[in-house]
Amino acid sequence: MLDFRPDEEQKMLTDTIARFARERLRKVYRDAEEEGEVPQQIVQAGWEIGLLPTAVPEAYGGFGEYSAVTGALAFEELAWGDLAATLAIMTPNLLAVPVMLCGTEAQRETYLPPCCQDAPPQVTGALIEPVVQFSPYRLKTTAVRDGDAYVLNGAKTFVPLADEAETILIYANEGGQTQAFLVAAGTPGLTVGKRDKLMGVKALSTNFVTLADCRVPAENKLGGEAGINFSLLLNHSRVALGAAAVGVARAGFEYARDYAKQRVQFGEPIAHRQSIAFMLADMATEVDEARLLVWETAWLLDQGQDATREATIMKQQIDRMVVQVADRALQVLGGYGYIREYPVELWLRNARGFASFDGLAII
Amino acid sequence: MISFEIPPFIQNQLQLIRMVAEQAMRPYSRELDENEHARPQAFVQMTWPFTQEMVKRTLKPLMEQVNGNNGSNGSAKPKKEGPDYGMVNFIMMIEQLSWGDAGQYLCLPHPMLGGAAVDSAGTPEQRVRFLKKFTEGEPKWGAMAITEPGAGSDNSAMRTTAVLDPDTNEWILNGEKIFITNGALALKESDGLCVVWATVDTKAGRAGIKSFVVEANTPGVTIAKQEHKLGIRASDTVALHFDNARIPFDNVLGDPEVQQVESRKGFLGAMKTFDASRPAVAASAIGIARAALEFTKEKLAEEGIVVDYTKALHELTAVERDVIEMEARYKGAWLLTLRATAQMAHGESNRLEASMCKYRAGDAVTWITQKSVELLGPKGYSREWLAEKWMRDAKINDIYEGTKQINQLIVARSLLGYSRRELK
């Protein structure tokens, strides 16, 4: 019944992740950003928290405790530490969660057990396309049935860790429906292109991927002949990214709050002024509200209900909120907010990305 | 365990409340808006039995407690097993009634804010003594009088005095209170009550302020003025004048300690009322927002405009984007309100969250209803439809029970750990 408190297990999990975010991610995020790489030991340590294996059903070697609400809690805490590292750590989800939710028995048996090992599987997913008018429900990449295969044509961008991936879950438009295909590295016609140069999340390696008459066996269509419930997957993706955006926004709010309390001008902390204090009140309120929107969508998904409307409303609200909160955090810091020695400019650049990140993470 | 599930007993009750809203409120909305001081008879008759049942349920364990220990000391609320979803029920009822008509909802024959003050500051004996009348007889109202011409958000500046007459052991009240919701209904048109805040020592500041129960037809209490308002015109809003009004000694709310002049407990106890009343105001705001949102979507659908939630941002028209933002702001404010209410159900402190949801909901409903009038074009501005009325009704939620700004201030102080002196 109506309750907004995480349970004991969820609290233990978020405490663990919060410590990891504070003691590991926050120590490396700036160097990682400047060097363009999340350190491998960070990705490994993040993997060892065990989020994905916990979610995978027991039959495939996991613990069978899949919950979008728990996933949202985890994503927020991780992203509070650093968004690029979060996306790197959670990259295997891009293939594993769709297989879990929509895969055939054979697909689950192939792809889920490797998700329960000591090291992350080298798999990823590709939804986003290098176009101005990107729409997940109306993809420009096409899939056409030809005998016992599907022929894929098109281009993808923002594909995380694509250059190392052994399998990429590629989304394509099949007769007006978005479907997904498990494509092995080395398949003729599949090319992992140059690395994306992005405004933010620079530590995350993402690539262009092109598909030129790429033939994929028919049994590699996710969900078999019937295909997938794409809305369901997109809604799960929006929960993950919504929660991550809440984490980024909260990081900005907390930093600005602490700064405003110690920055003295005209003989007292600037937080003593309503112009600053009211900005902080609005930021905290918008962060809390966004978190509740994420949780509600996640909870509906956990109940097995359709949450397409809720997920869309939540996504659009959060895309606005996270930029606004990060921008105000920078404003509270004044000139220091603009300097790369401080984290806030990085959070604003990351925040701006969420409007373009549909499908870049999933829980 | 995070859950958004509404307990079934509340869902069942909400269906009844919706019927009340559709049959006893909506048909009279326009008429009661145009005839400002008329009373919503149909609504009052239909809801009074609900109130009696609800108050009976609340008082039952208290009466047992009071009879058990002869009705004296101990202000602790009776302990119950598990969460108490009564407040969630009440909040959802307010939302549904305000969806019907916010002005009429405020005329609910119910202890309302006066009852909330008695509940949060009174002893069990006082709660039974003052609230029992809401379980029997003709419809009655409760009111609360804080605001004065010179004391709005700064209620510690109040000038109304309470002086103890040692000869009769009575308090003598003098002063003027304004903007009293249901003041006339509570004190002149029914056998209700009004909780009046007054100071027993003008030099003692907040510590001198206590709350007193004034019952209907007390000599020396007059209605000084009936206000004419922008919206919620069905609601009774008056100024009260106290001229040597005498009330019994034990009508001061709280245990004997509260009656000490130095104790701030009385003031803090009365302030606690807001922790419950702010989510209630937020819920009322949300009810209006939902009414406007549903109506707008219905009318747009008649024009062939239906939001497709699978469209990407660039595929949506400006109107569709507006509708989605209306839905987001409605939903977000409602979830903040449910959170502050659930905290009460679980016995947690909710001062910060109560102010947060109140200011966010007032802001959201003001924006949503203005957007609704805009999206509906000339018809939205016409008094033929209720959209323009909802816009006028909505604005009060930005103001009463603490303006948006005073609630922002409370939130900011709480977030920063600042006192009133540090953050003015």
Image: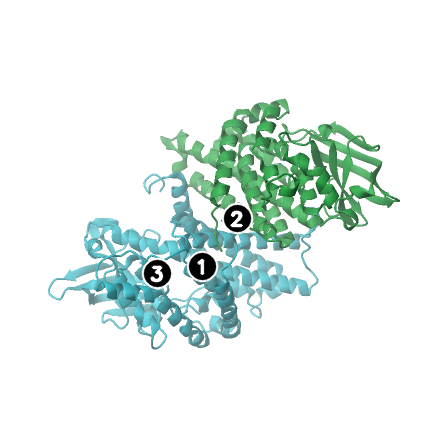
Measured from the top left, where is residue A349 in percent x and y?
A: 60, 33
Q: Which residue is mark 1?
A: B88
Q: Name the residue type under label 2.
A: Leu
Judge the density around disc 2: few (<14), some (14-19), many (≥20) Cα neighbours within 10 Å.
many
Give the Cα distance between marks 1 and 3.
Answer: 15 Å
Which of the 4 quarters of the picture holds residue A120? top right
Q: Colour of chain B?
A: cyan
Farthest residue toward the front? A59
- Name the foreground residue: B316 vs B12: B12
| Chain assignment, label 3 | B
Q: Is residue B308 left or right of residue A344?
A: right
Give the Cα distance between marks 2 and 1.
Answer: 17 Å
Farthest residue toward the right? A147
What residue is rendered at 73% in x and 42% in y? Answer: A107
Q: Colour of chain A?
A: green
Q: Which residue is mark 3?
A: B116
- Where disc 2 sits, the SS reads helix
Residue A127 visible from this viewpoint: no
Q: Which residue is mark 2?
A: A292
Q: Name the residue type under label 1.
A: Val
Measured from the top left, where is residue B369 in percent x and y?
A: 54, 59
Q: Name the residue type under label 3.
A: Ala
